[in-house]
């Protein structure tokens, strides 16, 4: 009988960026932002299914946004692995300002110029989100053991922008990364020469529409 293929590469850290499961506001295409919207029943089932897959990576640490939709997604993996979930408020979704609770259609009609620029009035800029979430990821990685496997449960726009910061991508290229579907993930691996590499993006599903707070031309 052949030996099972190892799920870790010794001496290299791995970061799994996991978007939360579906919510009712996702389905209604409402901008959630920092509003604390829970998972719907489909989202709960998505989290349980994804957790069974991610457990195979043998994670050594779990980190989450404190918003319920992310925290409950992370808890599904904690229930399987027995790992505690730590929380970092800097992993919450982009502050949507005046857009929070509005549908994508309402945003287009009421704020056409801001929608075109994807800048919510009274909310955060993409650069602010990238810096905030990227710094949270860097802090978490600083405390990760040499061959640690960290799973971070967070939000679509927050994760795409945060990983762009971590990878050192210039801002004009951020939109080239597509959005994350509900309960899908991206994998960032440590390079032996230093720095980080995107190994997988939006894994966990066949291509499907991304219902997210992320900008429409980035995958929604």
Image (tube, rainbow, N blue to C red):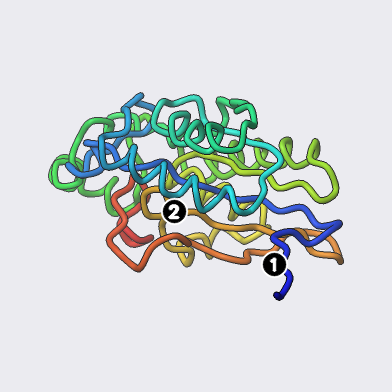
Task: Determine whether 219 is above or below 145 in the image.
Answer: below
Percent across and percent down for residue 68 are 41, 26
Query: Residue pushed farthest front?
Result: 1
Task: Determine whether 143 is above or below 179 in the image.
Answer: above
Q: Using a 10 Å C-alpha cutoff, classify the residue at mark 2 as few (fewer than 14 neighbours), some (14 to 19) or many (20 or more).
A: many
Q: Quadrant of residue 90?
A: top right
Of residues 207 and 79, the one nearer the viewer is 79
Quick check: 122 left or right of 107? right
Residue annotated with mark 1: 4
Residue 25 numbered tag: none
The N terminus lies in quadrant = bottom right
Percent across and percent down for residue 55 are 58, 47
From mark 1 to mark 2, how far is it between C-alphas? 25 Å
Quick check: 2 left or right of 113? right
Residue 184 numbered tag: 2
Percent across and percent down for residue 151 are 61, 43
Of residues 156 and 217, the one nearer the viewer is 156
Of residues 96 and 77, the one nearer the viewer is 77
Percent across and percent down for residue 23 are 28, 37
The residue lying at 64 percent from left, 31 percent from top is 83
Element type where label 2 sits in the image: loop
The C terminus lies in quadrant = bottom left
Q: Using a 10 Å C-alpha cutoff, classify the residue at mark 1 as few (fewer than 14 neighbours), some (14 to 19) or many (20 or more).
A: few
Element type where label 1 sits in the image: loop
The residue lying at 37 percent from left, 54 percent from top is 181
The residue lying at 49 percent from left, 45 percent from top is 51
Of residues 100 and 119, the one nearer the viewer is 100
The residue lying at 67 percent from left, 48 percent from top is 58
Q: Quadrant of residue 80?
A: top right
Quick check: 208 left or right of 195? left
């Amino acid at each position: 009988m052949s030996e099972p293929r190892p799920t870790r590469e010794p001496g290299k850290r791995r970061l799994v960026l996991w978007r939360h499961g579906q919510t009712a506001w996702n389905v209604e295409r409402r901008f959630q932002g920092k509003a604390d919207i829970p998972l719907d029943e489909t989202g709960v089932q998505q989290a349980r299914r994804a957790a069974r897959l991610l457990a195979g990576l043998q994670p050594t640490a779990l980190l989450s946004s404190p918003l319920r939709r992310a925290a409950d997604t992370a808890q599904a993996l904690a229930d399987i692995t027995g790992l505690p979930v730590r929380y970092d408020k800097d992993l919450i979704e982009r502050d949507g300002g005046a857009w929070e609770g509005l549908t994508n259609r309402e945003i287009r009609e009421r704020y056409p110029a801001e929608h075109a620029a994807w800048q919510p009035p009274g909310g955060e800029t993409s650069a602010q989100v990238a810096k905030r979430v990227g710094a949270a990821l860097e802090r978490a990685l600083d405390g990760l053991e040499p061959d640690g496997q960290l799973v971070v449960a967070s939000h679509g726009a927050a994760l795409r922008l945060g990983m762009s910061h971590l990878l050192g991508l210039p801002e004009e290229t951020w939109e080239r990364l597509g959005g994350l579907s509900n309960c899908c993930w991206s994998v960032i691996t440590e390079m032996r020469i230093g720095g980080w590499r995107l190994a997988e993006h939006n894994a966990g599903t066949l291509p499907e529409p991304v219902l997210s707070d992320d900008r429409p031309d980035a995958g929604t």
